[in-house]
Image (spheres, rainbow, N blue to C red):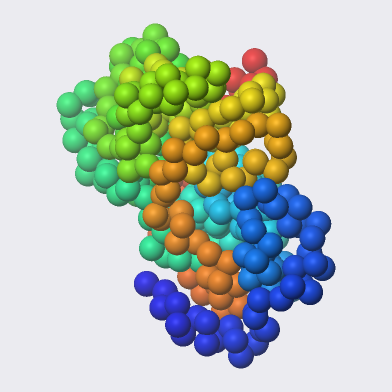
Amino acid sequence: MLDVTPIGSVLAEHYDLAPSVDLAEDTRDIYARMSRVVTPADWAMFAPYVIAINKLKKERGAVILAHNYMTPEIYHGIADFMGDSLQLAIRATEVEQDVIVQCGVHFMAETSKILNPQKTVLIPDMEAGCSLAESITAAGIEDMRAKFPGAPVVSYVNTTAEVKAASDVCCTSSNALQIVEAMDSDTVIMTPDQYLAQNVAKQSSKKIVYWAGSCIVHEMYTAEEIRAYRENDPEIRIVAHPECTPDVVAEADFTGSTSAMINWVKRNKPAKTLLVTECSMASNIADELPEVEFTKSCNMCPFMKKITLEKVLYSLHTMTQEVTVDPAVAEKARASVQRMIDLSAAAENA
């Protein structure tokens, strides 16, 4: 685990990171992207880090990939590419830089390494894990194969490299239905998210069997809670992530991946909306959509929030927190991820 005190001491020897109104003013164009949700005082604290990171990443030949659940100062302040798991996986195959800094959780950094074995992949905090990814192992995959012989295994990208290697193909919340429908089998095994599998099953022609994993953020939402929001304000539009339970999804006006949720809100511009997912999502698009009032039922991911500006700067400065994957495991996992990318591209071009 990173010890914050030594990190601060190391950085203080090389950078002036004291809060600065002058630097905040110098970066007002960046701040304008998040001024609705970040106070001027907070930006005065963030600005020195943002300036230092953006300068250092050029010196290191680095690119920063940030998930939609990152906080606004990371999402808008330092990220080169933002998106959901599928978008970041695709971006990881396209970047020219030799160093990738993954602002997300560990399985995302592993995916970038799997797709870029010759590049250096850093994650600012090794303990930025994922409850969903940790719920399944390669042995669990084999147990499922034994129970359902011949059924292909479709594993969510929210899994470790070992699980990806043990699977036939990966999927994300944005392409899960496409991937399942592309399987040449009447029965498909989905791991590890039971709710994504159940929500896909409602739309699929396949018989779907699944591993009983779940996301600690999305499983906290209940249908009763969502109904209460709508009863309190009938005009509110509910937008949910498919990792939520089927009864929550049934209450929603729209369900989709994080990027699909963002695009739906941008396209429809409801006067009031509730994003039923990790709460940083609303913060990251609030300034772009001033006409939309975001109602927050704020469930935060404790793992995503381990990634901070200070840790990003330290990781880039020291070139530490490097993610590695055993080459033999990576080769098999790469095939599963690449098959997902190829099937998604084929479906889009059909």
19 or 137: which is nearer to us? 19
> Residue 208 at x, y = what percent?
31, 19
When the figure is inspected, residue 141 is found, relative to residue 129, above or below; the finding is above
Q: Nearer the viewer, residue 20 or 218?
A: 20
27 shown above or below 143:
below
Quadrant in the picture for the N terminus: bottom left
Residue 27 is left or right of residue 219, and the answer is right
Q: Name the residue furthest bottom.
A: 13
Between residues 254 and 21, which one lies in front from this camera angle? Answer: 21
Say which residue appears at 24% left-offset and 33% top-offset: 212
Specify the quadrant that holds the C terminus: top right
Report whether residue 274 is seen.
yes
Q: Residue at x 68, y 69 (%)?
A: 44
Residue at the image position 65 percent from the left and 66 percent from the top:
41
- The residue lying toward the viewer, choosing from 229 and 212, is 229
Query: In this rendering, does residue 175 appear at all?
Result: no
Up the image or down, 237 lies above or below 133; here it is above
Q: Position of residue 148 (x, y in %)?
A: 22, 23
The mark total stands at: 0
Rendered image quadrant of residue 285: top right
Classify residue 196 as left or right of residue 65: left
Q: Tell which residue pokes out farthest to the top in this image.
A: 205
The x, y position of residue 348, in whole percent, is 64, 21
Residue that extends furthest to the front in the rendered view of this protein: 232
Q: Position of residue 332 (x, y in %)?
A: 42, 45
Q: Name the side, left or right, on which 28 lies relative to 314.
A: right
Residue at screen point 22% across, 40% down: 140
